[in-house]
Amino acid sequence: MGSTTNGTYRRSGRSGTWRNWGGNVSARPAREAVPASVGEVAEAVRRAAEEGLRVKAVGTGHSFTAIAATDGLLIRPRLLTGIRRIDRRAMTVTVEAGTPLKRLNTALAREGLSLANMGDIMEQTVSGAVGTGTHGTGRDSASIAAQLRGLELVTADGSVLTCSARENPEVFAAARIGLGALGVVTALTFAVEPLFLLTAREEPMPLPRVLDRFDELWAENEHFEFYWFPHTDGTITKRNNRSAGPERPVPPLRGWFEDEFLSNGVFQAANWAGRAVPATVPAIARVSSRALSARTYTDIPYKVFTSPRRVRFVEMEYALPREAAVEAVRELKAVIDRSRLRVGFPVEVRTAPADDITLSTASGRDTAYIAVHMFRGTPYRSYFTAAERVFTAYEGRPHWGKVHTRTAEHLAEVYPRFGEFTALRDRLDPDRRFQNDHLRRVLGP
């Protein structure tokens, strides 16, 4: 393999094929760069322009779309990691873009700090999670991107912009969820707060009862979500609320048995069986829906919000107006019940408050998220197509990092500020240095 003199480029050979975590997207970049500083990122972008290469940055590949795929220059930020600074007066932390969320969470906890909310996995890089709109569930606290107070962005000409509500505010409004279309994010500044405790209450509940009580469960809990097992009326509900303590984590043996053995090991084996013999899926789903019992525990936030996900899958998720959630789930259930579909993964339902980020899935409206999954290697298109018909009928907005078939024409209708984003893109990247086929489809040429 050859390299340039400053070491930021690595030429791709046969081993240069990139694949995402879900295994449904691959690409063969012409070059790879592994920059160790914002200056090296800027230099890599400038050199790519001289060579006529498109540029994409990719973290852990947890997106299920081709949002990071390129046949040009692929920037891997694995050397751009770590905390730059903690400002306890402003209660912010500035972190390098390639830092995994897991590393950020543990580092903050050691400092007695925490993010207010987060998604349910923490393997992604901070820039990848923010740039695609990763979220958890919350009545009042929103996505990871909504917790940003600033960011650093390398644009198409190699310039470095620092952005916040006061500095380049129009860029900040859009680049918090920038899809990799505005430039390469090299650092992010998050709002943090003193480390706190959450009490998690997890329990099975019949789906009709969950749907009848959905508004009540949402209103009474800071963080509410549920998982429904298709082919059954079974759900697992989860309610997370702040607690004065004391800390009472899940006992290690029970945690291993439920979170590793059952939720990963046994669940993986069940999905292998379902993939081999689809007719067994409804029976497996009935067993799965009864496998986990109720439990209550109290721990620091990232240990409550996140959980290990070792069973690989492909996912579609749509953001609907929160008031449409119950009817959409009922309709999705009816579609599955009257079809020949065999769905081995639970459907996940979460919520988020409205925010002011230009292309956030929760932009301007209180939101419910409905996510459908299929085991990796299992045909998923028929199921996802049927689900997408349901979701789009309720003015659904697809998650930017998950499978969907929407185009710029549709997205311009469901995002009131879509034109604001594309106009900024025209200004920052007129030559489409950060373009790829996926962005051409969802943002237009």
Image: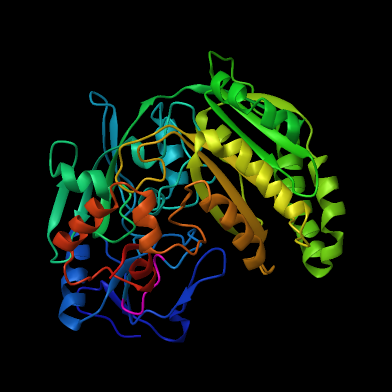
- Residue 253: % across, % down: 75, 36
243 or 400: nearer the viewer: 400
- Image quadrant in which the C terminus is located: bottom left
Residue 253 in the image: above or below residue 376: above
- Image quadrant in which the N terminus is located: bottom left
Residue 219's quadrant in the figure? top right
Q: Is residue 384 left or right of residue 231?
A: left
- Residue 223: % across, % down: 54, 28
Residue 138 in the image: above or below residue 145: above
Number of numbered discs present? 0
- Outermost residue toward the top? 244
Q: Which residues are magenta?
A: 67-72
- Residue 58: % across, % down: 38, 63
Q: Is residue 60 left or right of residue 93?
A: right
Residue 103's quadrant in the figure? top left
Which residue appears at 69% of the width and 30% of the height? 210
333 or 257: nearer the viewer: 333
Which residue appears at 26% of the width and 59% of the height? 184
270 or 407: nearer the viewer: 407
Note whether residue 98 is visible: no
Tell whether position 388 is magenta: no
Which residue appears at 26% of the width and 50% of the height? 175
Q: Is residue 226 left or right of residue 289?
A: left
